[in-house]
Image (cartoon, rainbow, N blue to C red):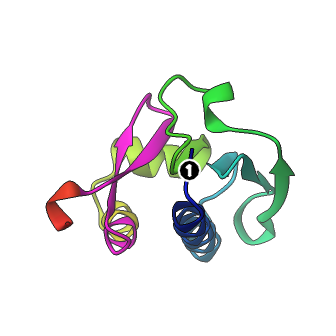
Amino acid sequence: MVSQAQKKKNKQMADAIKKWMLKHEVGGDTRIYFNNMCYDSVGYGKNLKYRTLHNIKGSDYTNYANDDTVTVTFEGEFYDIMNYSFGPLRESFSKMIEKFGYYFELGNAWNLSLYKNMRLI
């Protein structure tokens, strides 16, 4: 069972990921799963928006989901950043996640999940 404090943290992280993707226009074909819901991308680039879907979890779509925190599935630009780039955007994403005391791991080339960074506790 995920605590209310963890649910609040999950929403903060999901909101930060969504905001980061909108800022960098790299969220096309992405879903950000958290708290039995997800932000589902619609559009690309400057036309990117997110709609909220309820009663949905990452583990319904990938074996590597972490339903206790946040899972992201992706294609397009974000896929390229996560798989082919070790440049400033990937570093910026990683640092944003680290500010919450978490890190991400790729499950497949098209998904990642967040885990608590035990070295920061």
Residue under the point 74% across and 58% down: 44
- Does residue 27 lie above or below 71 as drawn? below
Q: Where is residue 14 in the image (x, y as percent from the top left)?
A: 59, 63
Q: In this view, does 16 lie to the left or right of 33?
A: left
Q: Nearer the viewer, residue 110 or 17?
A: 17
Q: Nearer the viewer, residue 67 or 109?
A: 67
Q: Where is residue 12 in the image (x, y as percent from the top left)?
A: 57, 72
Residue under the point 66% across and 48% down: 30
Q: Name the residue under label 1.
A: 2
Q: Magenta stretch containing residue 90, yes or no?
A: no
Q: How many numbered badges does the structure rendering display?
A: 1
Q: Magenta stretch containing residue 98, yes or no?
A: yes
Q: Which of 19 and 101 is in front in this view?
A: 101
Quadrant location, the N terminus? top right
Magenta span: 95-117
| Quarter of the rendering containing residue 83 | top left
The residue carrying pointer 1 sits among few (fewer than 14), some (14 to 19) or many (20 or more) residues within 10 Å by Cα, namely few
Residue type of the residue flagged with mark 1? Val
Q: In this view, does 36 lie to the left or right of 78?
A: right
Q: Position of residue 9 (x, y in %)?
A: 52, 68
Quadrant location, the C terminus? bottom left
| Quarter of the rendering containing residue 75 | top right
Q: Position of residue 23 (x, y in %)?
A: 60, 77
Q: Nearer the viewer, residue 54 or 92?
A: 54
- Does residue 53 lie above or below 47 as drawn? above
- The outermost residue toward the left is 119
Looking at the rendered structure, the secondary structure element under dot 1 is loop
